Every structure is written in structure tokens, then in C-alpha cells.
Amino acid sequence: MAKVLEQREHVTIRFAGDSGDGMQLTGTQFTHTAALLGNDIATFPDFPAEIRAPIGTLAGVSGFQVHFASEQVFTPGDAPDVLVAMNPAALRVNLKDLREGGALIINTQPFSNAKNLAQAGYAASPLEDGSLAAYRVYPVDITTMTLTAIADVGLNQRAATRCKNFFALGLVYWMFHRNLDHTVRWIEEKQRKRDPLVADANLKALKAGYHYGETAEVFTHHYVVNAAPIRPGLYRNITGNEALGLGLMAAAELSGLELFLGSYPITPASDVLHFLSQQKAYGVKTFQAEDEIAAICAAIGAAFAGGLAVTTTSGPGMALKAEAIGLALMMELPLVICNIQRGGPSTGLPTKTEQSDLLQGLFGRNGESPIPVVAAQSPSDCFWAAIEAARIALRHMTPVLLLSDGYIANGSEPWLVPQMSDLPRIARPFALPQEGAPFRPYARDEDLGRPWAVPGTPGLEHRLGGLEKQHETGAVSYDAANHELMVKLRAEKVARVARHVPPTEVAGAAAGELVFVSWGGTFGAVRAATHALTAAGRRVGHVHLRHLNPLPADLAARLEGFGRVVVPELNLGQLALLLRARLPAAVAARVESAPKVQGKPFKVGELVALAQSPAQSPSNMESPQ
Amino acid sequence: MSQNPLYPSLPPTDAAALTAKSFQTDQDVRWCPGCGDYSILAQVHKVLPSLGIPREDFVFVSGIGCSSRFPYYMNTYGLHTIHGRAPAVATGVKALRPELSVWLITGDGDALSIGGNHLIHLLRRNVDIKVLLFNNRIYGLTKGQYSPTSEQGKRTKSSPMGSIEEPFNPLALALGARASFVARSIDIEAKHLQDTLAAAAAHKGTALVEILQNCNIFNDGAFEGITDRKVKAERQVHLAAGQPALFGAERELGLVFDAERLSFRVARVAEVGLEAIYVHRPDNLVAAQLLAELSAPELPAAFGVLYERPRPTYEEQLAAQLDEARARVGGRPSMQALLEAGETWRV
């Protein structure tokens, strides 16, 4: 039978199976192949909170979504076009996301087992009860065909069964007209030396899957997604947490400082600690502290000692660090605090994404305690956000909060690798002794930063602490007027960060019916929605904020020309609250909050719908089941 | 003495020219008149010039409490941090800059209550930091609540019917946390305190010195049962490495190890003979644990270096790992190579 090859602009695939089924590896392989073929891509891994949930259970389902296209990609895709379900639990968990009429590749073998069905909550096999009629179902006995294909390799039953993800990968490669070269090379280079038998088996399974697609009568169509127009250069795939680590290292190199990370393990921030602890050859010192408080306090000690000091955490850790952040801002030491946000409050949803720590970051301390706040907008942007946070910290001598979130931390995208030689240096504001003049640790420059005198420098011995300081001399002072002056100086220092913020860019229309104002990891979805709306002839703009504190000075002017100012956020409206408080009344009155708090990112469709009807927030659209 | 790695062009100052006065600041000392802290400050001022370390290489770090005002009275680099967290801050200083001489000033509330977690982990890691733990068995700065070293039954503002809590023994706790050096001294015993501080300074690793310190306002006479002139000869045993543990006005008493009861008991030297008296071996952990628990009036409290057993420090092992990582790849690699690591493709 002749097979039809059709062209598609973009496709979203989700691989889903048990935690032990190798879905992350499968997804990553597909992603790299798509990238090598020139597609633009975005991915979203979704793994269970439990480390080793029982096999076959709903809690143990692991998924990996990849969106690849012949055009620019901003998100991992709203709804998969293709779902690969390796067992009943994976089907149960993921089916609701598959778009209507989407392709459903099901590994049938576990569906013939009553226990597997029961674990997923199915009374009868969904393959037989007609419940999948809305989809194009491709039942494939992946397990059995894999075992048959690799029977002569000589793996035991358990190891052989584990090769079935390569069969599925081969099949999907055929379906989307990809060649096997990249994965074959990967197996030869990475797996061969570890276990030649497994390498042989995976190769056979991969090819068997591919040939099955080619020859079996089940599949009548396959699809091609051409290369996307992409800026030329050297690319790699990168996750947000890796990019964050690299950005911090780059900032250390650009400033000539030693990088010191004080951290305590917490999801989803731990990968930054893992990454940086592997970079000892670059002089990176990492300290796994006894708790969140010790982690930031050690970083404060390293900042005093003259390092580029960083602490990484997530929401609950931020709560614990609050007092120490106050100390750092009182001592006016440079420090980068990275909060990889997750669902809260309390322990909340550790593996799910949210943007609900914005106000905590701005205000969650005792006393008048402003710090600059910046946010990363995508996985690769974590690199640039980290450099910006370090630049502000060193220029203004202040702790800086860098907000990322679980969605961009674990998500990945292709990254045009920058040249270190192109990046502007960061000045190192170390003080030097001056003959005859007493050292004044709280004398200030035009940015209101104070001199950084590091131990070991003769003549600059001085004491810092959490008690209020006398203006300029830094001596302990309880004087009422001095206290008010210092409170105002610390506030003005943070406000002056805005002098260095570049002009606000408006994507889409410069004026019109509606402007989206967003921050952080929602960038991709909001930008994609803006493109969709403008393509449909709507006059819609998009402002995405890198700087949350202080806000850009020109923000109000950029928003003035729009009728509606819609603020989509993965919280109950924290930026909206801030904008209403800080923008001029005329603009503030137009602010509409569009909250969503489901532990999941926005879908592009949800945002497009906001432009249709002001009343429909994404929260109203998807009520909890 | 070491060159400042951040400013190789600045020569270190002459440590030999330092005197006690070099370490005094122009700040008014604000402890209550009669406070034991004055003596401790004076002894620290006296000991530092003898260490051969330039003034700019000292960093004094403290938490919160009366004792934690200490850095303001030291003309060195200093940090007056937040309650309980000084060990973590000091660890960051030392981990980044191993060449600095880092001293930590803390009290019984700061170190053992709010900062208990940080203290035990500092000791376990063996960061080369000198910890001076001022133990006055009371919260002084907050005006008189019982502390984690207050004795059971202690009546204070927050325990009007007497504290019902078992107190910590700071040295036993430190030994349990794998400290590599523990010692005990007394605020008013100037010479003994100086010698003990010098021994702590000479130890490479975390050195915990418990200093019994009198708070004459909120807990006056807390250690009278040990320090009073009339009883101190019988209630203090001063230990020195390789020396028999003798005490009493005529050194007529000694500690004898009772193998059957696995403990020390007091014996008259004349009765048991000098050879029966315990000869102090600071590298013996079990002996140190028993000595730390000795308490007056039944047994003399132990003073001096109870335990010292050097082992690699945190910061030198960290630095060694960095060196090893660089050696494995033949020197510090380029940042550009790291940016381009992994699977890449060209468009």
C-alpha cells in the first residue's frame, strides 16, 4: 500500500509511559533529531513527584512533550497532536490533553492485563469499549514486537522489555519522516561502551519500529515538518536550570570574581546545584548547606569576602531565607538569590509550575526592605537573566532576586550559543585604600552603591551588620533622622536600577484594543497568542517584563495607547496588583487580571480567548475536575 | 601570612608591629559594667598580636546577643549577623578565602538554641574557624530568660516555677558533633584564657572554646560554685597534654580512671600514687567525653584543651577538589568551550 506524505507547519507529540519506560530519553532523542533537521522546538518534561512510584500506577506516569515546527516556536504546544501511551495509566493521565482527532499510538500489550487496567482505573479496556472514538487510534503491540525483534541479542526478559521505548521512537521517526542517524550515533557513542548488548538491542528495536511504520497497514499517512527560518549560528539544546548555571558562571568570568553557590536541595532548583557542583575546574565553589538559611548565610559570607555569591532555592526556601535577605540588603552586599518557583503555598506542588512568589520576593521581609527583582522568560533566557541579576547586584551593591519557575527550569529549547568575547564586562567595585582618608563603607556613588572592601585589604578594616548604619561612616546608629534617611537611600538605590533598564519593547501593535503585560515563564504562550491575534487582524500588543522591581520608567507610556491592559499570570493576580498600585491612575484603571493557578502553564488558546471576552479568565475556562 | 589574592599588588602589613592596641576600635564598649565580656575582649586583644597574622586578614563574625557585639570592638574586618547564623556566614567567608583567619563570637542562646543546627554542622565539617562560645547560662540581651544551658529548676522571667528543661553541655555536644578541638576556660582567668585562645588559634580546624562568662545582671554568680576563690582549687582541674590530672590547693588530688565504672573518680595522690592518676591525652575522644561531663561539686570541672585531633579542613579539601578537577583537564578550561559543550548543531 502506498503511503501518503503530508506537510505540516507544526506538530506536538507527547511520549507517555511508566517512570521506568524511558520516556524522558525517548523525548530527548526525538528533540535532538528535530533540532538537527532545522526545526524550531520547545519541550516540556513532566515527571512524577514520587521518586519510584509502583509500576503501572497513575502516580508513576512520566511524560515528555515536544513541539517542533517549520516556523518560530514559543511554547511546547497547547494540546498534543500525537500521544504515545505505553501503558493504561499513561493513557488515563494524558488522554484529556490530546486534541480531538489527534493520533493515539497505544502499546496494546499491557491493555490485555486486567491488573494493569485496574491500576489505571479502567473497568474494561478502553481499546474495546469505544471510548476512544474521538481519536485516530493506532493499536500496536510494541512490547511483543520489541521482544521478537531483539530475541537473538540475548538480553534477559526484563532488560529486553526495557527496549520498547526505542521501538516507539523508531515508529514515530517514521511517522514524521525523520531519519535515524542521530539516535543511531547516540547509541553507538554513548551506549555501546556501557553495555554492548543493550546497544545492539536498542538499535534493533529502533529499526524495527521504523520498519513497522513503513510496512504495516496500520499507518497510511506520514508527515513532514520542514526546517524553520532560524538565525544562523551554533545551537545547542538547553534547559532553564543549565542556562541559569552557565549564566552565573559567565557573570563570574565577566566580573573576574570567584563564583560561590550556597544551596540546599529543593525541587525544582536542585539541578542548578548539581550543574555548578560539576564545574570545579572553572573554580566554582559550591556549598551544600545544612538548611536554606545556612545556604544564603554562607553566600552572604562569601559576598563579604569578595566572591560572586549566589543562593538557589524555591518558594519554601525563600520563606526561610527572608531574614538573611534583610541582612544582605542592610549590609549592602552583592548577592544573587534565585527562586525557581513552584506551586505553593507551603510544600504545595513541588514538581508543578507557578508564578506565585512575586509579591513574596518584593515584600516578604520585615521592615522597609526593597530589593531589585528580575525574571527569566524562557529556558535559554535564564542565561541572560542571570547575567543581568549579577550586573545589578554588583553595580548597586544589593541582593537581587532572580525569578525562574519549574516550567522553564525543566523545559528546554534550542539556544544560539553566544560568544563570551561579545559580552560586556561587569565592573568589579572593590575599594582601594586611600592615604590619609578614613574609610567610609557607606559613602555612595551615583547609583547609590557603596564601596566593597574585602578582607585582606590593608587599611579598610570595617564592620558590617544588621543594625542600622550611620550614613557614610557605617557606624551603628539609632538616630531617628538618620534611620529615615537610610531607609530612603536604600529605596532610592533600588529605584535607580531603572536608570539602566533599556526601553520597553512592545511586540505586535504599538497601540490598539489590547496589550498583554506578562512576566517570567509565560512569555512563550503570551507571545504566541499575540502573534495569532495580530495574524487574525487584531490590534494587540505584548509587553514582557524582565524587571519587576523597579518597573521600567517608560512602562506607563508604552501601555497608554491600548484600551485594555490584560495581565495573564500563574497566580491570583500579583503583577496586576503591583501595576494597579504603581502605574498612573488612568492606565491602572485599565488593568485586567487573568489568573490561572493549576500548576500548569498557559495554553495559547486560553490567552487568545482573553482577547475575545474580558470575562473569561483561564481559571473560569477550566474548572477543576 | 598570605598575599591578598584579590589585590596581589597590595603588600600585607607587618604583623610583628601589631599590639593589643592595634585591635581596639574607637567604639564605646556597651556591655554592662562588671560584665565578663570585658575580660574576654581584653584577652583576645592581647592574643591576636602574637599570632603573626596581619590585621587585615582577621575576620570576626558574630550572631545576636550580648557577646555578638564583639566585632564592633575589634579593629579588624567584622560581621555582626543575625541570630544563630554566624557559623554559616563564617563558613562562607572561609570557604571562599581560606587564607583569612576567621573567628566566631557567640553565646549559649545564639550557638545552642537558635543556631544549634549551624553549630553542629560547622563542627562536623571542620571549617578552620575559632569559635568562642560565651556561656553565661542566660539570655542577657533580651533581659533574663532561661537558656539552653540554664540548669533545671532555674527561675527566670520565662520560667517562674523553674526551668523544666535538661540543659546542654556545650563540650559534650561539640564532641558528639565530631569537633576536632574542644576547650574550656573562664572569663576572669586571664592567663588561662589567653593560653587556651592561643591553643585554639594554633589548631587547624574548627576550634570550640567554651568560656564560662558571668552575667552580673541576670545570672550573677552562675559559676560561683566553680570559680569562687574558696572552692576553685578543689572544683577545677586544669588539663595539659601529657600531664597528670592533678588539682587541689596542694595538687594533692587527682583524677583516676575507674575501668569498672567507665568513669573518672577523685583520689588522693598520697593514697593511690602518682602513677595511678590519669595522664591527659587530648587525642582520646572517650576520655574527652568523660572529662566534658565532670561537674562540680562531686567532681572538678575540666578546663583547658579537652580534645584535639587534627583532620583535614573543609576549605582545604574543597580547594583540593578544585585543583584536582583542573588537573584532570589540564588547567582551567575556557568558558566558551563550556557554552558549546554537549550536542550542538549549526544553522
Image (cartoon, coloured by chain):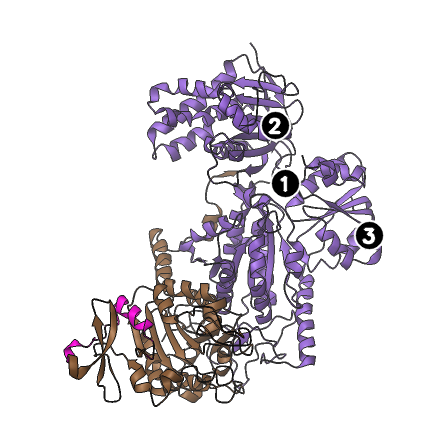
Chain colours: A purple, B brown
Circle 3: residue type? Glu
Considering every residue shown, the one lying at the far top of the view is: A1
CA gap, disc 2 to disc 3?
A: 43 Å
Label disc, if present, on residue A267 of the rendered structure: none
Same subunit, labels 1 and 2: the answer reads yes
Residue A317 left/right relative to A276:
right
Residue A201 place in picture, x, y as percent: 38, 25
Chain bearing mark 3: A
Chain to which mark 2 belongs:
A
Q: Which residue is mark 2?
A: A95
Q: Is residue A13 visible?
A: no
Instruction: Judge left or right: residue A292 versus residue A622.
Output: left
Q: Which residues fall within the magenta stretch?
A: B273-297
Name the residue that disc number 3 marks: A560
Q: Position of residue B114 (x, y in %)?
A: 50, 67
| Quarter of the image where one finds residue B309 | bottom left
Q: Is residue A266 left or right of residue A483?
A: left
Mark positioned earlier in the residue sequence (1 or 2): 2
Rendering coords of residue A338 (x, y %) = 56, 55
Mark 1 — on which chain does it sit? A
Mark 2: give few (<14), some (14-19) or many (20+) Cα within 10 Å. Answer: some
> What kind of element bears circle 3?
loop
Residue annotated with mark 1: A600
> Real-space Cα distance between discs 1 and 3?
31 Å
Query: Is the C terminus of chain A in the top left, top right, bottom left or bottom right quadrant?
Result: top right
Q: Quadrant of the N terminus of chain A?
A: top right
Residue at disc 1, secondary structure: loop
Whether the residues at callouts 1 and 2 have beta carbons within 8 Å, the answer is no
Question: Residue, x 40% and y 18% (percent of image)?
Answer: A149
How many neighbours does mark 3 have within 10 angstroms: few (below 14), some (14-19), or many (20 or more)?
some
Camera-side residue of A324 and A537: A324
State the residue in front, B247 or A620: B247
